[in-house]
């Protein structure tokens, strides 16, 4: 079977135990039996759509590929992903009171998975991917998240860096807002 994938999805095939595939740029998805691509990727050939914006989506996508091709997964990476899922779930309660406006579907998946509250009004912060050129009045509360070309190729590292960036920026900014509020109340 002739399988193709894109650089963003290659790690999923590796972790799922698929070792016979070709990596192509998204614009070159053609002449294959099946393409393993991001769910939003349009293609004329049969595809196996995957979502890779959260640890849970990575985990689910690995098993979609494993089941489709009847392969043996990388158990060590699965243990790591399970650990990261559990660690993230433990932190959700601490994040639910932080309201954010989010631009970009992949970021909505990430923000929801992390437990932050998505709102289009009365929000504390704006989360935007680096490819959107939007001007904001109050840039102090805008957090720009790297996407596609500006992220590690390693899927787990990519998600980890995004989660850490969001956690550090949102929680630290929330702490500064609390300090300002306390100072105002004095």
Image (cartoon, rainbow, N blue to C red):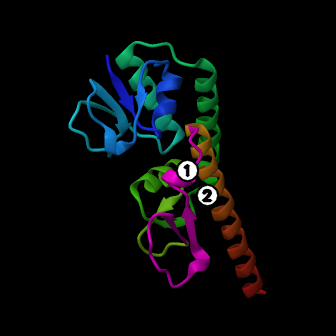
Q: Residue at x 44, y 72 (%)?
A: 133
Disc 2 marks which residue? 166
Q: Nearer the viewer, residue 24 or 168?
A: 24
Q: CA gap, disc 1 to disc 2?
A: 9 Å
Task: Please tell me whether residue 69 is drawn above or below residue 96 in the rendered image.
Answer: above
Task: Please tell me whether residue 177 is drawn above or below residue 42 in the rendered image.
Answer: below
Specify the segment rendered in magenta.
125-154
Q: Circle 1 sits in a helix, a strand or a loop, which is it? A: helix
Say whether residue 181 is left or right of residue 159. Answer: right
Say which quarter of the image contains residue 35: top left
Task: Please tell me whether residue 10 is drawn above or below residue 151 in the rendered image.
Answer: above
Say whether residue 93 is left or right of residue 186. Answer: left
Q: Is residue 11 magenta?
A: no
Residue pushed farthest left? 44
Q: In the image, residue 111 lies at what x, y percent?
A: 51, 54
Label for residue 114?
1
Count of residue discs:
2
Q: Is residue 146 magenta?
A: yes
């Amino acid at each position: 079977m002739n399988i193709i994938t894109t650089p963003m999805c290659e790690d999923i095939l590796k972790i799922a135990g698929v070792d016979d595939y070709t990596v192509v740029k998204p614009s070159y998805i053609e002449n294959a039996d099946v393409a393993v691509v991001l769910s939003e990727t349009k293609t004329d050939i049969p595809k196996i759509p995957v979502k890779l914006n959260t640890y849970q989506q990575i985990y689910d996508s690995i098993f979609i590929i494993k089941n489709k091709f009847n392969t043996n997964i990388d158990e060590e990476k699965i243990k790591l992903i399970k650990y990261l899922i559990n660690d993230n779930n433990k932190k959700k309660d601490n994040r639910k009171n932080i309201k954010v406006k989010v631009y970009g579907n992949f970021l909505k998946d990430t923000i929801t998975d992390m437990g932050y509250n998505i709102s289009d009004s009365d929000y504390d912060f704006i989360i935007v991917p680096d490819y959107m050129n939007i001007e904001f009045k109050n840039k102090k509360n805008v957090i720009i998240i790297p996407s596609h070309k500006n992220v590690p190729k390693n899927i787990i590292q990519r998600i980890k860096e995004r989660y850490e960036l969001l956690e550090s920026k949102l929680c630290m900014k929330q702490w500064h807002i609390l300090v300002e509020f306390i100072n105002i109340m004095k």
